Image: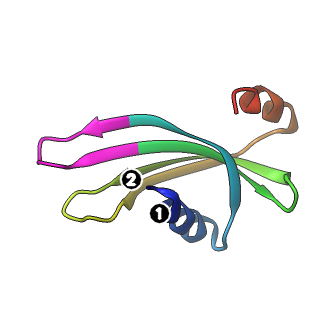
Amino acid sequence: MLFLSTDKALEEHFGKPKQYYCQQILKIEKKIEPSHFNVTVQLITFEGAHDFPFDLVTITFSNKNSIEWRTIDIKSRTLKPNEITNITKGC
């Protein structure tokens, strides 16, 4: 359900399309308004055939006043080589 919104958020954030894996939902938050949710996902982006740089990205989407999911927050940080193995163990 969030696949296209995720692609769009990554392209806007990085200025180009990015491949990713290890995506997971961190939080689903129901808001007071009917059918309004915030969903926070986390994923790892990469270049080429799973090459560096790897970025850990956290995106929060909202469907407030819309049937489409909009990005309301995005954070990223480049992972160090020794962090990749630890983070991707659960993928």
Q: Residue at left 75%, top 33%?
A: 88
36 versus 81 height, above or below: below
Q: Residue at left 69%, top 27%?
A: 90
First in residue order: circle 2 vs circle 1: 1
Q: Residues within 10 Å of mark 1 (few under 14, many from 20)?
A: some
| Residue positioned most to the bottom | 16
| Residue positioned most to the front | 1
**Quarter in which the C terminus is drawn:** top right
Q: Residue at left 44%, top 55%?
A: 1
Residue on which disc 1 sits: 5
Residues marked 2 and 1 touching at CB (< 8 Å): yes
What label sits on residue 86 in the rendered view? none
Looking at numbered disc 1 in the image, what kind of residue is underneath it? Answer: Ser
User: Residue 52, image x and y in percent?
Assistant: 86, 52
The reply to whether residue 10 is visible in this rendering is yes
Give left or right: position of 81 versus 63: right
The reply to whether residue 56 is visible in this rendering is no
**Element marked by disc 2:** strand
Between 84 and 23, the residue placed more toward the observer is 23
- Asked whether 38 falls inside the magenta stretch, the response is yes
Give left or right: position of 77 versus 3: right
To which quarter of the image does residue 15 belong?
bottom right
User: Residue 6, image x and y in percent?
Assistant: 52, 59
- Asked whether 67 falls inside the magenta stretch, the response is no
Residue range in magenta is: 28-39
Give left or right: position of 83 versus 65: right
Residue on which disc 2 sits: 61
**Element marked by disc 1:** helix
For marks 2 and 1, give the one nearer the viewer. 1
User: Residue 63, image x and y in percent?
Assistant: 28, 57
Between 81 and 37, the residue placed more toward the observer is 37
